């Protein structure tokens, strides 16, 4: 019988199994969703399916630059515990995927998951890793830079923070210094022109209310806001930040004639709502209390 793509997609979402496995399961069970789930369990993908609802907020941010120095990738792969993030199988998967991204440059996460490494879809490799390692594994995000200039990466604390920077040029040490600055000081833009307009307006509104709360006359509030906005720029604009290795200099000072064209800074698990476990309640529930 013909199996519709929507049914395959539903089974995939319910089990976390790969698309091909879901299609095989539905074909083998005549399209019966529950029987297809059982089929997947019987074929050894149950371990992966059982993990699909768990929160994967640990893992690692990894970085890679191609041998010719022209392609750079930043990748975040998540798992459930930091112990697993140091598992050699987890790290091997992450390295295999990041090199694949650099070589094939997929357009987005869906394209990556649908692409193949050694004859297997990336989504299936992730499902297999979930079953092998015993925790939910997921590729969360990636970014690819291509340049005629210089690329530098920096990974902090084994993957807790990752940075990818594109510059016009400069020494390896300069690139490293800039990447470390971004990791430490967390700027949101290279310079004032790059500050998000909504972020800027939000900050101005907060500063206006602060000034009014302080009892300042409305006629001078705007001038006060603009003065404080300059301080805001020095905090969020990379080139205006005080250099972390020398507080007598700004990042602009150390750049000399070089320019930072763009950067990406990711902190592991940011934005993922981690599940908080009440162990006392859990034990009580298990004991039937």
Image (cartoon, rainbow, N blue to C red):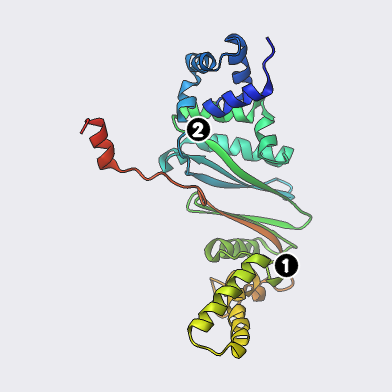
Q: Position of residue 114 (x, y in %)?
A: 68, 30
Q: Identify the image quadrant of residue 107.
A: top right
Quadrant (top left, top right, bottom left, bottom right) of the N terminus: top right
Could you give the CA–CA distance between mark 1 and mark 2, rounded to whole angstroms? 38 Å
Q: Position of residue 165 (x, y in %)?
A: 66, 58
Q: Pick the residue in front: 229 or 201.
A: 201
Mark sitting on residue 259: 1
Q: Position of residue 249 (x, y in %)?
A: 59, 78
Question: Which residue lies at the image location 61% right of the left edge and 35% below the top edge?
Answer: 96
Q: Is residue 288 left or right of residue 157?
A: left
Is residue 119 visible from the viewing direction of this image?
A: no
Q: Pick the residue in front: 20 or 134.
A: 20
**Which numbered disc flags the more N-terminal residue, 1 or 2?**
2
Q: Mark 1, residues whose alpha carbon is within 10 Å: few (<14), some, or many (≥20)?
A: some
Look at the picture and state if 122 lies above or below 36. Answer: below
Instruction: Name the secondary structure under disc 1.
Output: loop
Mark sitting on residue 89: 2
Instruction: Name the secondary structure under disc 2.
Output: helix
Tell how many labels: 2
Look at the picture and state if 254 lies above or below 40. Answer: below
Q: Position of residue 118 (x, y in %)?
A: 66, 26
Quadrant (top left, top right, bottom left, bottom right) of the C terminus: top left
Q: Is residue 278 left or right of residue 172?
A: left
Q: Identify the image quadrant of residue 84.
A: top left
Q: Mark 2, residues whose alpha carbon is within 10 Å: few (<14), some, or many (≥20)?
A: some
Question: Which residue lies at the image location 65% right of the left edge and 60% below the top edge?
Answer: 172
Look at the picture and state if 73 lies above or below 201. Answer: above
Mark sitting on residue 79: none
């Amino acid at each position: 019988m013909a199996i519709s793509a929507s049914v395959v997609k539903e089974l995939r979402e319910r089990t976390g199994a790969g698309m091909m496995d879901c299609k095989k399961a539905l074909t083998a069970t005549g399209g019966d969703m529950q029987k297809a789930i059982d089929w997947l369990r019987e074929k050894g993908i149950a371990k992966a399916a059982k993990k699909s609802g768990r929160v994967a907020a640990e893992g690692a941010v990894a970085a890679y630059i191609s041998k010719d120095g022209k392609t750079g990738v930043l990748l975040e792969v998540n798992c459930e515990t930091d112990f697993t993030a140091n598992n050699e199988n987890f790290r091997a998967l992450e390295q295999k995927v990041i090199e694949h991204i650099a070589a094939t440059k997929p357009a987005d996460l869906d394209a990556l998951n649908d692409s193949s490494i050694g004859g297997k879809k990336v989504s299936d490799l992730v499902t297999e890793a979930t079953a092998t390692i015993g925790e939910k594994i997921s590729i969360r995000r990636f970014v690819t830079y291509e340049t005629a200039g210089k690329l530098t990466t920096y990974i902090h604390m084994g993957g807790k923070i990752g940075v990818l920077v594109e510059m016009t040029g400069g020494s390896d040490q300069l690139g490293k210094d800039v990447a470390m600055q971004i990791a430490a000081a967390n700027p949101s833009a290279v310079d004032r022109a790059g500050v998000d307009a909504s972020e800027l307006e939000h900050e101005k509104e907060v500063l206006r209310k602060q000034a009014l709360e302080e009892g300042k006359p409305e006629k001078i509030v705007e001038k006060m806001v603009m003065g404080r906005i300059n301080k805001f720029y020095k905090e969020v604009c990379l080139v205006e930040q005080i250099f972390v290795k020398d507080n007598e200099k700004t990042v602009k000072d150390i750049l000399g004639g070089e320019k930072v064209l763009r950067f990406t800074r990711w902190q592991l698990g940011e934005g993922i709502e981690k599940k908080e476990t009440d162990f006392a309640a859990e034990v009580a529930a298990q004991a039937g209390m």
